[in-house]
Image (spheres, rainbow, N blue to C red):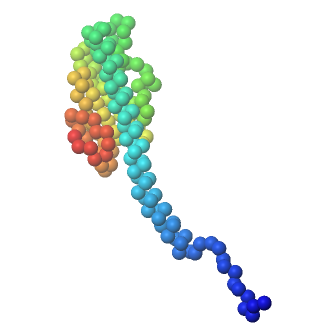
Amino acid sequence: MHLFPRRRQLAGFTLIELMITVTIIGILAAVAIPAYSEYIRRGQVVDATQGLAAMRADMERHFQDNRTYLTAGLYTTPCQVDEAKRKVGSFTLSCPDPTATAYTLTATGSGATSGFVFTIDQANVRTTTQVPVGSGWMTCTTAWILKKGQAC
């Protein structure tokens, strides 16, 4: 028998260890969440460009068959399909004021992509006409900007 019984070691973490862990997790989250949000936004922007490219192909097929971008007889221009078919992801495609020989297709974002506007015309001129203010994205008159910081 011992005169002084041994003290039993306590298992667990000290407060300082827990605070260090919480701080590290906070720093990682502060970096990861904005990066992930930007990654998601880049994926949503691709919906607009793919939708515009597909609608442009439809417009060119219509022109090839009818020699006009407007409705011809029983053949309705792709610009006039119902709005549900012009919805691509969080973007809405539109075709304001087409003529017999020209058009401009527009993809306007909503929700997480609100503020983005992309266009393409019959000559395949692609533009990024509008981006969210202060987002770090750029506008461009000659290309679609597909990621933050991309140059025109």
Whether residue 114 is visible, yes or no, is no
Q: Is residue 122 above or below residue 149?
A: above
Q: Residue at x 39, y 33 (%)?
A: 47
Q: Where residue 85 sits in the image (x, y, percent)? A: 44, 23
* Residue sitting farthest toward the front: 1
* Residue sitting farthest toward the top: 73
Q: Is residue 112 above or below residue 3?
A: above
Asked whether, in this view, residue 55 is left or right of residue 14, the answer is left
Q: Foreground residue, 63 or 35?
A: 35
Q: Give residue 48's quadrant in the image.
A: top left
Q: Where residue 98 sits in the image (x, y, percent)? A: 28, 20
Q: Where residue 64 sits in the image (x, y, percent)? A: 28, 11
Q: Give residue 104's quadrant in the image.
A: top left
Q: Give residue 99's quadrant in the image.
A: top left
Q: Residue at x 36, y 29 (%)?
A: 50
* Residue sitting farthest toward the right: 1
Number of marks drawn: 0
Whether residue 62 is visible, yes or no, is yes
The quadrant of the picture occupied by the N terminus is bottom right
Q: Residue at x 22, y 23 (%)?
A: 123
Asked whether, in this view, residue 67 is left or right of residue 4, the answer is left
Q: Where residue 78 sits in the image (x, y, percent)? A: 36, 18
Q: Foreground residue, 57 or 141?
A: 57
The quadrant of the picture occupied by the C terminus is top left
Q: Foreground residue, 75 or 49?
A: 49
Asked whether, in this view, residue 22 is left or right of residue 4, the answer is left
Q: Residue at x 46, y 58 (%)?
A: 29
